[in-house]
Amino acid sequence: MTKFLFFSGKGGVGKTSLSCATAVMLANQGAKTLLVTTDPASNLGDVFGQEVSLDAKEVQGVANLFVQEINPHEALQSYKDRALAPLKALFPDDVVKAAEEKMNGPCTEEVATFDQFIACMHQPDYDWVIFDTAPTGHTLRLLELPSSWSLHIEESAKGSGQTCIGSVDALSASKEQYDNAIRALADPETTTFVFVTQPAQLSMDEMVRSSIELRKLSISNQVAIVNGVIPVDEREHPYSSRRWKKQEPHINELAKHFAGKIGYMPLYADEVKGIAMLKQVGRDLEDAIAL
């Protein structure tokens, strides 16, 4: 298993449940694990029944497991507080206010969010870092940022020497970290990208398209988990049989278009919520696919 696991997929396919179950499984094996959500609509707090914030917090009832939420607005405010603190000691309020206004654009929020993302990838205290990412389009943009931002820094250095969040000189350390992130994401021994999909046409089509886009970013270590498959012992039931007959062609078709390993998770009768249920899902996931 690689140190970094990225769970992604179309909204509503169960990626949060499976990323949480994986995190609980690893933590129960004695590995210090950080679970990070980059999804603004994440229900990570509901799954574990506790508050999740920008600062990593230990999960109650699961030793070795910590959770963290990267919220773009909170990340931006945290970045601005750090960047403006030295100015407040040296300049009048109107100068500080003008500087803050320049930092309110989408560029600063995007970079502030990615700074938090990068910080999670540079956590030496954790054995594994698991990312519960936003729906696929947002995730692709996040993963494209290291390259585009590094290029922006290089171009700014040749011109004005200024970027949307400060001087090039002040960002040299950030550029090095961004370049390291590119290498880590593309290293199959460091990063695994886990697609979660439902056995349905739209969900699988989006997953295959996203897989191709990731390969363009040199992220080739990919696996797929088909979630919500009708269990074998229920396929003779009249209702379940009809559902299985709709699922089976899509499952067979996926193997023709996805080159990585594919695992299958059953449809559960109960909501995946609470530590006990997450442990059960983790055991099933371990049987279904060796990450």
Image (cartoon, rainbow, N blue to C red):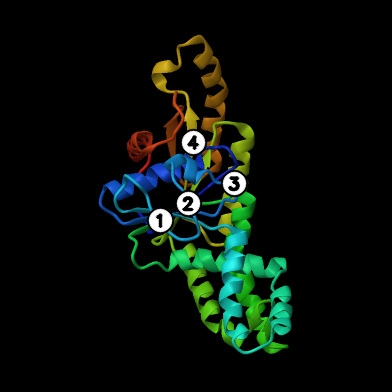
79 vs 259, left or right, is right
Query: How dense is the environment of label 1, judged by Cα within 10 Å: few (below 14), some, or many (20 and up)?
Result: some
Residue 248 at x, y percent in the picture: 52, 25
Vertical comparison of 45 with 239: above or below:
below
Q: Which marked residue is nearer to the observer: mark 1 or mark 3?
A: 1
The residue wearing badge 3 is: 41
The answer to whether the residue labelled 1 contacts the one labelled 3, judged by CB atoms less than 8 Å apart, is no
Amino acid marked by disc 1: Lys
Which residue does the image show at 59% across and 54% down from the upper left? 139
At label 3, the amino acid type is Ala
User: From mark 4 to mark 3, how far is it between C-alphas?
Assistant: 22 Å
Q: Going 73% across and 74% down the picture, which residue do you hit?
A: 101
Q: CA distance from mark 1 to mark 2?
A: 7 Å
Q: Is residue 291 visible?
A: no
Q: Residue at x 49, y 69 (%)?
A: 181
- Which label's residue is closer to the chain start, 4 or 1? 1
Nearer-N-terminus badge (3/2): 3
Residue positioned most to the left: 30
Secondary structure under the numbered disc 1 in the rendered image? strand
Residue displayed at 51% across by 59% down? 219
Q: Amino acid at mark 4?
A: Val
Q: Quadrant of residue 61?
A: top left
Which numbered circle lies on residue 226?
4
Mark 1 vs 2: CB contact within 8 A? yes
Q: Position of residue 185 (x, y in %)?
A: 49, 63
Disc 2: which residue: 52
* Secondary structure of the residue carrying numbered label 4: strand
Q: Residues within 10 Å of mark 4 (few under 14, many from 20)?
A: many
Spatial CA span between label 3 and label 2: 13 Å
Q: Earlier in the sequence, mark 1 or mark 3?
A: 3
